[in-house]
Structure formats: C-alpha cells, structure tokens
Amino acid sequence: MVIAPAPGGPRAVARCDALGVAPYSDTPGGLYRGYLTPAYGAAQAALADWMVQAGMVVSRDPAANLVGRYDGTDPAAPALLIGSHLDSVRDGGCYDGPLGVMLGVEAVDALHRAGRRMPFPIEVIAFGDEEGSRFPAAMLTSRAVAGTLPAVALDLADGEGVTLADAGADAGIDIARFRDAARAPGSVMAYLEAHIEQGPLLENEGLAVGTVTGIAAQLRYRVQVSGMAGHAGTTSMPLRRDALAGAAEMILAIERIAITDQSDVVATVGRIAGKPGAANVIAGHVDFTIDVRSGDPARRDCAADAILHEIRSIAERRGLGLQLARVHDLPASPCDPALMDLMDAAVIGAGQRPRRLVSGAGHDAMVMAALCPTVMLFIRCRDGISHNPAEHVDPADAEVALDVMLGFIDQLGASFAHA
C-alpha cells in the first residue's frame, strides 16, 4: 500500500508527480499538458479537490484559470494571490509550474489546519497557458487576469488547426468573455510565485531557495521561410531554393550573434518544422521560432535587430521568401523591493541564508506586475534541469520553500496590520 505524504512540501512534490501521468498528460509515456486539453481538465479537477480539502472555495474564471479562495478577516481587503501555471511543455518535467501551485495549496492548508485567517484573503490561482506550448502565444491567461490581453490576441489556432475559440467552447469557455477574467485595479495587494530555479546557481551555492530580483526581457518571433520543393535526385545544387538549408544557415547566425554579444543575451530556436517532410524531397517551406532574452531590454533589442537583419540577408541571397512575425514582447519585470525584503526576512526566519538572483526564464509574475506588486521565490532543482523529464526537486527543499512562504505571509500580515 502506498502511503501519501503528510501535509507539507513533500506532499506538494508528490502531487506534482501524480499529475505527471495519464489522465493528466495528453501523451503516453511522457508529460504534455496543453491548455484546454482533456489532460488540462483532468488536472484541474484533481486540483479543485485538493483546494477544497485545504478549506478553499473553488471557481474557474472566464479564462479557465482555476482559483481557490481562502477568506480573510477583513472582507474589504485586497487579496494576496499565490500562483503559477498548470500547463507544461511537450515532454516536460513535473514541477515547472505545478509546484508553485501545490505549495500555495499547502500554505493555505497549513493556515486552515491551524484555524488561522489572515487580515486579507488568500487566493491560489493555477494559470492555464504560461508556456505557449499549444497556442503560439505565451501567458494568455495571466495576461487576461492582469487586464493586458488585447482582443486581437485571441485569434489563435494550435498546430492541429483548432482555434482558441473552438477549444474554449469544448472546455465550456466562451471566448467572448475571456478577457472578463481581468481583476479590478486595487483588488490584489500582491502576487507571490514559487518556482523551480530552472538553473544551477542555487545548487552550486548549496542553497535550497532564493529571492528573485526580476525577470529578463523577452522577444519571440515566428519565422516562415519559403523556397521551392523539388526532387532530391534530379534538382542540381546550384538550382535549388532549399528552405531548410536556408533556415539552417539562419539558425547558426542566430547562435553566432548571441554568442558574440558576450553578455547575458541568449537566443534560442526551440521549434522547427519543414514541409513536405519527405526524405527524397527538397524542403519548400520551413517554420521556426526565435526567442531572444536579456536582463537589459536595450541589449535584447539590439541583438534581435541584428538577428532579423542577418535573416533577411540570408533569405535574399538564397532567393527565399521570408515572413517574420513578432509573437510577443515582454519587458523586463523587476520584483517589488519591499516584498523582496519581506521574502529575505522569511528566508532568514526559515534558517536559510538569503540569496538574490535574476530569472532568465519568463513567468506569469512578469505579466502580473501590471496589476500589482510581485515577488518570486526560487527553489533548487537538480543540475538546473527544466523542460525535461529529468526535472527533479528534493521534497526537503519544497518543505523549506513552504516554511519561507508561510513566513512571508506572516510578514505581509504584520505589515498590512501596521499600514
């Protein structure tokens, strides 16, 4: 008989593990949980049960985010929002996103079991589409909550041609009301997100947790290269307009430009698809993505401009058609200084050495900064691995993170009472 872990950090990790297999994954033998898929619905159902057990009232907002509310003693007080995302990349790990949600549930559960209410309500929110792994735009649902999502951004289709509107209808969501998920200004006092680091710094320094100072600026593009499909055996090399060879040269140029910048600039081609995709046919069309990031927005923009200039030059020289579309532009997002101080105090209160670090990865927190002050807690992950089935978190580190989160909530409650 399998004995479930007691409440706390280890249970949060175990619940993430439980959501890593069918029916909570859309693919057999690995984890992929896309927004508004059957696996997403199943994961929401399981999470809703856990929220209810923790004393929360559960609802789903118009953008299909799951929300658990734990009322405070002051019904007029703005809420502390604790969240992260429930979706995953393809063939991903179990903790990127869900761990922050499960730790939020555990924090509320600890308060509920102790019979405690804070002066303000606490809401745990599980966002639906942080990764952008199903539809070609990330953070749709947190942008809806923050009130920064334009109506035109909802005109999307996934790789199978299913529109966001149709996927929403299948899941019981009316796309016309999607943006009604927006929270009113002043209704949220702060947003707290706990997340695995997705990097090696904490592990290298022997630390379980760290306070995030901010999130790097991001640019993402969709690139379409068109050439001429032809027979692989009868079309001579000088006469070819090979879209895949052109795309390959572009991708190497992207890497070269990022490396030669000699800074924190990173550039990634994470997705590529060639058509018609036959072994004996020259590729006539290639789609790929570009992701450019830096803690310095000006440096990011300079690198992106150099990349786009080089791509256009390669396409012209090779006689290839080219279409470029900017999918999203996310500015650098610093965390709130006062909240970082409270987090550092909570880290010390949990017996840990405080450490501040920047996040190169994007998170829902960078979107939520448009609505309220934000703060993030990073949790050590083995070898810094993420977006990979080898993703691993020590349950003991999750317990430390929970202690820090509870300490932060206490610190926030004390500052709220004296405000």
Image (tube, rainbow, N blue to C red):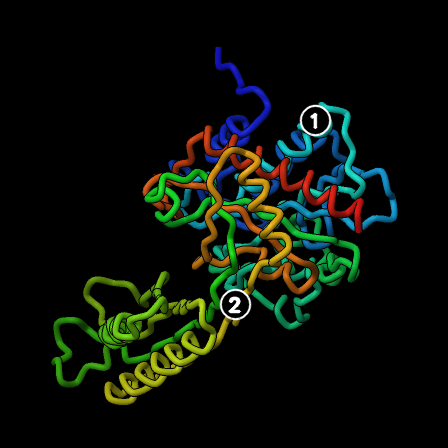
Numbered mark located on residue 63 in the image: none
User: Which of the 4 image quarters holds residue 220?
Assistant: bottom left
Numbered mark located on residue 53 in the image: 1
How far apart are the alpha carbons under marks 2 and 1? Answer: 37 Å
Q: Residue at x 47, y 60 (%)?
A: 159
Q: Dot 2 lies on which element?
A: loop
Tag 1: amino acid = Gln
Residue placed farthest to the top in the image?
1
Q: Which residue is mark 2?
A: 332
For residue 74, above or below residue 308: above
Q: Mark 2 vs mark 1: give the one in front.
A: 2
In primary-sequence order, the first of circles 2 and 1 is 1
Q: Dot 1 lies on which element?
A: helix
Tag 2: amino acid = Ala
In this picture, residue 52 sits left or right of residue 297: right
Q: Residue at x 41, y 40 (%)?
A: 207
In this picture, residue 258 sits left or right of residue 236: right
In the image, 8 versus 134, the foreground residue is 8
Q: Position of residue 10 (x, y in %)?
A: 51, 27
